[in-house]
Image: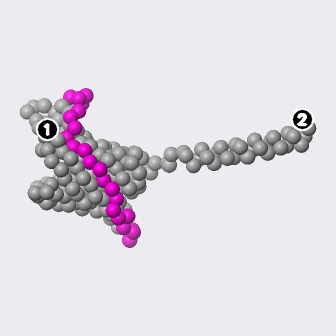
């Protein structure tokens, strides 16, 4: 093969590799946000529907909710106001998400008229898991809720409990979709 043939092959190979690299980067997963920015996907207004099962810790039924989440002016706290209804009763609460950079830990505070709960959460690019424990009849019970992103404007979730950490019983399932984008930061 002459020099001209090798030059054409070399140019074709370079074009192929450049195309392959461009295609690979287009399909590479986005870099996961870290710190407080990892909570950004929750900002905005969400509507959700939930179906609950009858268990020792939940009643069978369905619930609809609207949740509006916005960042504090300092961008340290994501504050969510929620209203929900089971068709018979309406209720309201507030949730605050924050990130403790020194402890590298996320916090979720559920604020209700009768008190505040600090629930541990784990955040990654595809999900948020809320975990809490309590004692029932001398036995430890763990409850976890997992929100899994389907796309930036939709996620599905479920809550389950276990008294041994191995066998889990589903308490509820649901879906949420964003109905309004996040408010602009001041």
Tell which of 178 and 40 is nearer to you. Answer: 178
Q: Is residue 185 magenta?
A: yes
Residue at image location 21% in from the left, 28% down from the top: 164
- Disc with the residue nearer the chain's start (2 vs 1): 2
Q: Residues within 10 Å of mark 1 (few under 14, many from 20)?
A: some
Q: Within the magenta stretch, is there residue 180?
A: yes
Residue 17 in the figure: left or right of residue 165: right
Image: magenta residue range: 164-186
Q: Which of 61/96 is in front? A: 61
Q: Is residue 43 visible?
A: yes
Residue 138: x percent and y percent?
10, 31
Q: Quadrant of residue 124?
A: top left
Q: Tell me if residue 4 comes above or below residue 41 in the rendering.
A: above
| Image coordinates for residue 43, horizontal then vertical, percent | 35, 60
Measured along the vertical axis of the image, is residue 45 above or below residue 129? below
Q: Which mark is residue 158?
A: none
Looking at the image, residue 64 sits to the left or right of residue 15; the answer is: left
Which mark, residue 55?
Answer: 1
Seen at 67% across and 47% down, the residue is 19
Reading the image, the residue beneath label 2 is 1
The part of the image, by quadrant, that contains residue 170 is top left
In the picture, measured across the screen, residue 78 lies left or right of residue 63, that is: right
Q: CA distance from mark 2 to mark 1?
A: 76 Å
In percent of width and height, residue 62 lies at 18, 50
Can residue 102 be seen here? The reply is no
| Disc 2, SS | loop
Look at the image and name its color scheme.
one colour
Name the spot of residue 128 as percent of width and height, x first: 33, 46
């Amino acid at each position: 093969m002459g020099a001209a043939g090798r030059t054409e092959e070399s140019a074709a190979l370079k074009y192929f590799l450049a195309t392959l690299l461009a295609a690979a980067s287009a399909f590479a997963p986005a870099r996961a946000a870290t710190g407080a920015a990892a909570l950004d996907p929750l900002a905005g207004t969400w509507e959700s529907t939930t179906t609950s099962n009858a268990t020792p810790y939940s009643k069978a039924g369905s619930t609809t909710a609207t949740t509006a989440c916005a960042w504090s002016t300092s961008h340290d706290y994501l504050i969510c106001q929620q209203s929900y209804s089971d068709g018979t009763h309406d209720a309201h609460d507030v949730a605050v998400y924050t990130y403790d950079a020194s402890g590298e830990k996320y916090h979720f505070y559920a604020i209700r008229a009768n008190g505040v709960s600090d629930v541990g959460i784990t955040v990654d690019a595809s999900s948020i898991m809320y975990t809490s424990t309590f004692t029932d009849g001398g036995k430890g019970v763990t409850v976890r809720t997992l929100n899994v992103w389907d796309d930036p404007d939709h996620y599905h979730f479920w809550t389950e409990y276990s008294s041994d950490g191995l066998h889990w019983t589903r308490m509820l399932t649901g879906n949420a979709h964003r109905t309004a984008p996040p408010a602009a930061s001041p």
